[in-house]
Amino acid sequence: MYKPNMLFHGMVQGLERPFKHLIDISLGDAHRGGLQPITFVRQVISACLYPSLLDSGRLPIDVKSRARNLLKQCEGESVGSYTATCGLPKIQHSLSEFISRRDRGVPSSPENIFITSGSQQALMLVLRLFVHGKGSLQTGIMTPVPSSPLFNMALSSLGGAMVPYHLCEEEGWTLRLDEMRRALATARRHCNPMGLYVINPGNPVGQVQSQKSIEDVIRFAAEEKLFLLADEVYQDSVHDPTAEFVSYKRVLHEMGPPYSNTVELASFNSASKGFMGECGLRGGYVEFVNLDSAVMGHVYTLFSTEACTAVMGQIALDIMANPPRSGDASYTAFFEEVQNRRNTLNNNAKRVQETLNSLDGMSCQPIRGGIYAFPQLHLPARAVAKEAGVAPDLLYCMLLLEEMGLCVGPGSEHLQRKDTHHLRYITHLPDEPIVQPRANSY
């Protein structure tokens, strides 16, 4: 992965640079970008970590009540104790109720929910369920291009084969069935495709799938007997007022038999994104749908090989799933903070998109959801051929960092269609100005 450590080292050594401040918009870390934590989240966590606060007059009554209830779920009423492998049962139930509310009453069972140290760990464990074999028997996973480099590295490290299917940039990074069929047919010549990985809303491209698109993907997975892995960690980050997040589980349920009771699905979510942005607390979960009971027993055994996730991350998930409600002491302040944050993210996404599309040599598809922009660089031929052995967009990122103090990610890190070049920006810096690099200054 692109890590500008050498350039940072040069700056530390006091080398003269043509900028005063470094702006790092390469990582999807909301708090590092300047967004402040939600007060209610930190108050509950503080009270759980230091129960003496419960006897003080410094915390609202609903914060104290939430903290006391959570502590009662912990062995020894301490967050320093281990929890069950799948997480605290109360929080599993909170997540189950959250999922059912989100999906308009679709049933959700706590026994099918496993809490992990972030969604990436959950993805790794699920991949371990069925990645095996070599040669023509090697497990293949259909993976979108562009996609998350962390997923691609995890798949490779476990011995799986990536089966790339390209999203259609010209149509707003849509998933096309003809492309997915092409990718699958090609892959079956050298591996055994068993899973289909989708990211909705998209990372890094920011698309939001329509219900019809999701239905098409589910039918495709059913026809080809593929296990669905739905990465839905950006579900609370939809910026386009004409778009709506609809979960794969809800669509699967609404399609009815035979799809609703046969298509196997693992869906992932996290407290690291959305209105909380609590990346450092490491709280995520996976919910399984339509797995055979014998397979679920194997899932439990596999997840038991990992220690329980940190209790602080579990508490963050509980608050995400069950925030203050109308009438609670903290409700008004909580609602205002969350709404202000959402307004900031929505405005920033619009502002970044407009700015990038106004620059010579750049174009950016609509940022409908997620927290990233993935603009295309339209580089002159002399720039593409300028540095043999270095991807043009990586070289461009290095020059941006050296000459402007702007750290962004190269599209080549996320994979991209041949002969195209992209950058990845996060869109949630609240106070920093948008730096306007020009592609034709290469």
Image (cartoon, rainbow, N blue to C red):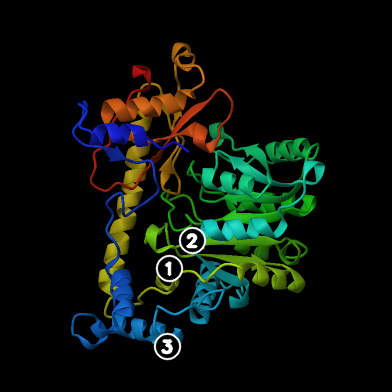
Q: What secondary structure is marked by label 3?
A: helix
Give the Cα distance between marks 2 and 1.
8 Å
Seen at 29% across and 74% down, the residue is 46
| Callout 2–callout 1 Cβ contact below 8 Å | yes
Residue 219 pos. (x, y %)? 73, 52
Looking at the rendered structure, the kind of residue marked 1 is Gly
Q: Which residue is mark 2?
A: 118
Q: Which residue is mark 1?
A: 313
Give the Cα distance between marks 2 and 3.
25 Å
Q: Which residue is mark 3?
A: 76
Residue 376 pos. (x, y %)? 46, 29
Seen at 79% across and 51% down, the residue is 223
Residue 172 in view: no
Give the Cα distance between marks 3 and 1.
19 Å
* Quarter of the figure that contains the C terminus: top left
Looking at the rendered structure, the kind of residue marked 3 is Gly
Looking at the rendered structure, the kind of residue marked 2 is Gly
Q: Is 94 drawn above or below residue 26 in the view shown? A: below
